[in-house]
Amino acid sequence: MSKLPLSRRAFFAFALLLAGAPLFSATKAPPAPVEPAATSVAELRAQVETLVNAPRFAGALWGVKVVSLDSGRTLVEHHADRLLSPASNCKLFSGALALDRLGGDYRIVTPILATAKPDAAGLVAGNVVVSGRGDPTWTSRRPKQDFWSAFEPFVAALQKAGVRSIAGDLVADATWLRQTPHGAGWAADDLNDSYGAELSAVTLDDNYADLNVTPAATAGGPCTLALAQPLTGLVLENRTQTVAAEGARRISALRLPGENTVYVYGTLPVGGKPDVVELPVPRPAQWFAAGLKEALARRGIAVAGRAYGVRWPEAPVAGATVRLGEVTSPPLREIVTGFMKPSQNLWTDLIFAQVGEWARPAEASAWRTTDACALVALQAFLREHGIPTEAVRFEEGSGLSRNNLTTAAAIVALLQTMAKHRAAGDFAASLPIGGVDGTLRNRLKGPPTEGNVRAKTGTLRWASALSGYLTTAAGERLAFSLMLNRHVATPERSARAEIDAIVQMLARCTGKSAPAEAGAHE
């Protein structure tokens, strides 16, 4: 395994190689054989057991549980109490916790403060502070808009407050979030790609920038580098080369921890398409402050002082007690959908942090981290709903940590809880839909899964998971969790394909379980 962090594109290519999958193939891999539709629960159980016990999984670990939401019966169970890496199935817990504790209507309110009131001419004779509260939605990415649109709510709030100029500094204060910029258990390689962007109570464009890399007009010259977003503070070191038209297309980037220089290296063929590399921006609050200062200048509001950011454990700005206005997030249900559908780590961890700060005990030490408070809140939520706490061992909320562990049984218990919860509609609506959207848009296409399966994906290098809801051909509603760890896939069949094959079995089943109270055999 390479010790160098990889760009997103290179990372996935490298992961495919590790898994044994070809990067290019002249012919598509043959489709997996389709099992006949099970006509009973017993037949369904036998089909699943045959698959998970196949010799190709001799070195792998499966965790499987399938429960009927209608009858309450367990249809399929295979090592359901085995602790496994759920990857982004952790987001199911984070989303459920947030909807339970805060509610779908909850909005994050970000105060805009000052150390002095605007005078009659609109001059603030002091500092203006954006006091971040972990709102992840300050972005021009969703939907794709002009970069400066992310600052419009702040500009409008200051204009409404009568601010015409600022004599002091413009500060983005991110000290509300009391934790390190990277989640516990994240790997070093994660920090060089967008999915490992820094955590901050003040965010901008998901805390990463897009680097456009374009081949030169002739072979031998360096590629052209251009950042799509301004004021990032990143310094680009161009180590790229344009090669002949039949040459390799391989661009990567490396930024050492604590530094701003990004080394961009690799090759693009002459006449080929440009490439895009996603670069995490260090100290996002600093980036936001610089961008807001420029956005204000464009609207005629001058800032005489510096634009800078602060983060925990640095001290917050003192004396900012005048409230100039506030910026309010969309409702929480939309934010949960915003991280569930695309499996967005930053948004998830910031909402997990939102619950942590909401639940922070008054007697807690100033050094108790936000994520520690959130983990305590998660354990309390699990206990309240009868989900064994020993079966959910997390370090953070997004699932990027390789140390997060849970069981298929715990995930199904969560799904059962949320199916009856007051936020059941919001929770189900947040999940990717098979063959339609989110991380399932290219999976589970066609009947009987397309538009039927609502489930959260999870993928790390040696972990793949899918958990959620579906309705069988017999009209029975199921909650399921399928986790596969340590499986070395073949070029013909990925870990995802193995999991999807079980989902197909479930959806095609024409048998139905008997009500639990009837005591009938299935």
Image (cartoon, grey):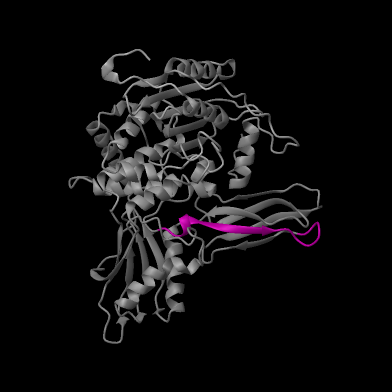
**Start-end of magenta stretch:** 203-221
- In the image, 239 versus 505, the foreground residue is 505
Residue 200 location in percent, x, y? 39, 54
- In the image, 37 versus 347, the foreground residue is 37
Q: Is residue 136 magenta?
A: no
Residue 282 seen by the camera: no
- Based on the displayed image, in which of its 4 quarters is residue 154 positioned? bottom left
Residue 39 location in percent, x, y? 47, 19
Quadrant of the snapshot with the N terminus: top right
From the viewer's perspective, tell me whether residue 83 is left or right of residue 517. right
Picture mark count = 0
Instruction: State the residue at coordinates (23%, 68%).
Output: 321
Residue 240 location in percent, x, y? 71, 54
Vertical side of 160 occupied by 319: above or below = above
- In the image, 14 versus 436, the foreground residue is 436
- In the image, 370 versus 26, the foreground residue is 26
Quadrant of the snapshot with the C terminus: top left
